[in-house]
Image (cartoon, rainbow, N blue to C red):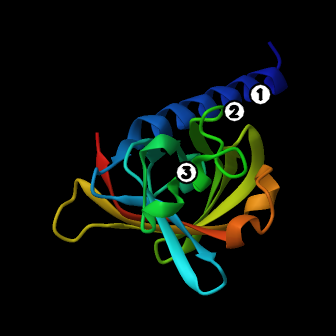
Amino acid sequence: MNIQTTLKSFFIATLINLNIVAHVNAQEWTLTPQTYVGFKVKSMGFSIVKGRFEQVQSSMHFDPAIPQNASAQFVMDLNSVSLSMPSLKNMIMGEDLFYVEKYPTAIFKSHEFIALGNHHYSIKGDLTLRGVTQPVTLDTVLKPNTANPQLLDVESKAVVNRSDFGMKKAFGGIGEQVNIKVDGQWQKR
């Protein structure tokens, strides 16, 4: 075995060991049941319709020392949405918008965490809704909870266009831009 092969093997083994150590130090998190996962959108140009997903499966693999190795996933049960304007539920759940009969879940899966400093992160990932997958970036604050070390306070937000997911434009006075928000806490598993 020559020196070049030996060095190459050493560096590969070192990288594998660093990845294993990073993976071991990272912790698994899940959103607390009280965490708000939802959206708001303008209706008729002046009122706001808010929706909250009551059933969300969530997981996050995160170590603040190495955020580039972090990952997060949310699966929202669209049938569990509660609306600030319940009279719009049939329209929102129907074929022109969520189309829950055919697509009962929405999924966000991250592929990159970028540390911006002072507990701010840009979380890039893909949102799948109505069978359409689009890139979405969550502007996120993740910081340790001062009262409980088992919790991370979280606030994430993003804006998407309904038509990017095959929803009808300007349907029923519902606005094109949808503000997505996660506000609450991640808890260590």
Residue 80 in picture, x, y percent from top left:
42, 45
140 and 119: which one is in front? 140
Using the rendered view, name the quadrant where residue 34 is placed.
Answer: bottom left
Using the rendered view, name the quadrant where residue 151 is placed.
Answer: bottom left
Camera-near label (3 vs 2) is 3
Q: CA distance from mark 3 to mark 2?
A: 58 Å
Residue 134 in sight here? yes
Disc 2 to disc 1: CB gap under 8 Å: yes
- For numbered disc 1, what is the local secondary structure? helix
* Residue that protrudes farthest toward the bottom in the picture: 46
Residue 4 in picture, x, y percent from top left:
83, 26
Which residue position holds label 1?
8
* N-term-proximal mark, 3 vs 1: 1
- For numbered disc 2, what is the local secondary structure? helix
Which residue position holds label 2?
11
**In the image: residue 4, left or right of residue 143:** right
